[in-house]
Image (cartoon, rainbow, N blue to C red):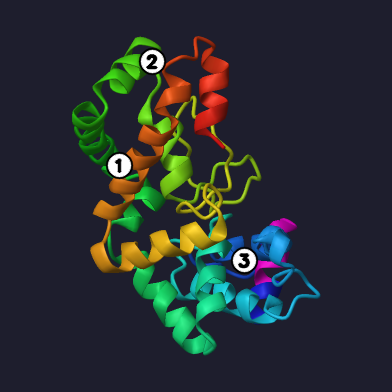
């Protein structure tokens, strides 16, 4: 309750109570919960997991004020809530997940270009025709990989938690690690593999998705359609 009041006061321009780092981003959580897996109707205000998810995200925001809450992070916590009954254990898993397997790189956008270079090499080997098409039309990997791999801030909401978005990115600002790209059952299987194999699995799935889409992408001359396909 203390953190909620402080964050609300900060959003209204009252800076009398000091806020450490990005604690003020806690005010975004209630906005995100109803649109987290909305088809399940479990995380909205009337949903059975609303309070649990809200508390886990609020605790994490205060636990890591240097990161805070970034819009879309609710999907990470929600998928854990769906599989873990103990809220303390779900929070512990979220906290551990965020500091391992390179996920902080995508949150902070630090050294993220190196990861795109790795994917560049993988795509060159796996699908050279598609790679050449992307180069020909100046389609950069950050225009779809960031959408597939990670959550994203920079939505123009004015909250300090929002991370700067790479320039000219043509993807929605609230996305998570394949959870809004793939059907839930398939995405859960991807997460199983991710916990087993680590970050390399993200590359494998991304390449597999592009290979699956290549028959459409290679015969498409309209790049707006290409961007639309990649951002679904």
Residue 231: x and y, percent?
A: 54, 34
Write the residue at 65% across / 61% down.
37
Residue 199: x and y, percent?
A: 27, 56
Residue that label 3 marks: 26
Residue that lies at the very extreme toward the right in this rendered image: 46
Secondary structure that dominates the magenta span: helix
Q: Is residue 117 above or below residue 219?
A: below
Q: Is mark 1 on a helix, strand or loop?
A: helix
Q: Is residue 123 above or below residue 20?
A: above
The label shown at residue 112 is 1
The label shown at residue 50 is none
Residue that label 2 marks: 138
Label 3 environment density (alpha carbons within 10 Å; few <14, some 14–19, many ≥20): many
Tell which circle, 3 or 1, labels the residue nearer the N-terminal end. Answer: 3
Viewer-nearest of labels 3 and 2? 2
Work out which quarter of the rendered image holds the C terminus and state it. top right
Q: Is residue 165 above or below residue 57?
A: above
Residue 217: x and y, percent?
A: 45, 22
Q: Is mark 2 on a helix, strand or loop?
A: loop
Q: Can residue 14 be seen in this view?
A: no
């Amino acid at each position: 309750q203390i953190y909620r009041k402080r964050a609300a006061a900060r959003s209204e321009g009252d800076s009398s109570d000091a806020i450490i780092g990005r604690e003020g981003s806690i005010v975004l959580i209630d906005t995100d919960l109803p649109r987290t897996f909305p088809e399940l109707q479990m995380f909205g205000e009337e949903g059975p997991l609303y309070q649990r998810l809200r508390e886990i995200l609020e605790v994490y925001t205060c636990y890591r004020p240097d990161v805070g809450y970034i819009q879309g992070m609710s999907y990470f916590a929600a998928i854990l809530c769906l599989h873990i009954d103990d809220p303390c254990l779900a929070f512990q898993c979220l906290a551990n997940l965020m500091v391992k397997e390179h996920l902080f790189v995508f949150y902070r956008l630090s050294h993220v270009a190196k990861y795109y270079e790795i994917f560049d090499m993988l795509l060159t080997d796996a699908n050279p025709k598609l790679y050449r098409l992307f180069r020909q039309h100046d389609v950069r990997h950050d225009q779809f990989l960031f959408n597939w791999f990670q959550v994203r801030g920079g939505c123009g909401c004015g909250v300090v938690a929002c991370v700067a978005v790479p320039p000219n990115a043509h993807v929605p600002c609230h996305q998570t690690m394949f959870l809004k790209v793939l059907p839930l059952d398939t995405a859960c299987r991807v997460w199983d593999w991710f916990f087993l194999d680590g970050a390399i699995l993200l590359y494998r799935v991304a390449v597999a998705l592009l290979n699956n889409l290549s028959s459409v992408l290679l015969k498409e001359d309209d790049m707006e359609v290409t961007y639309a396909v990649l951002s679904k």
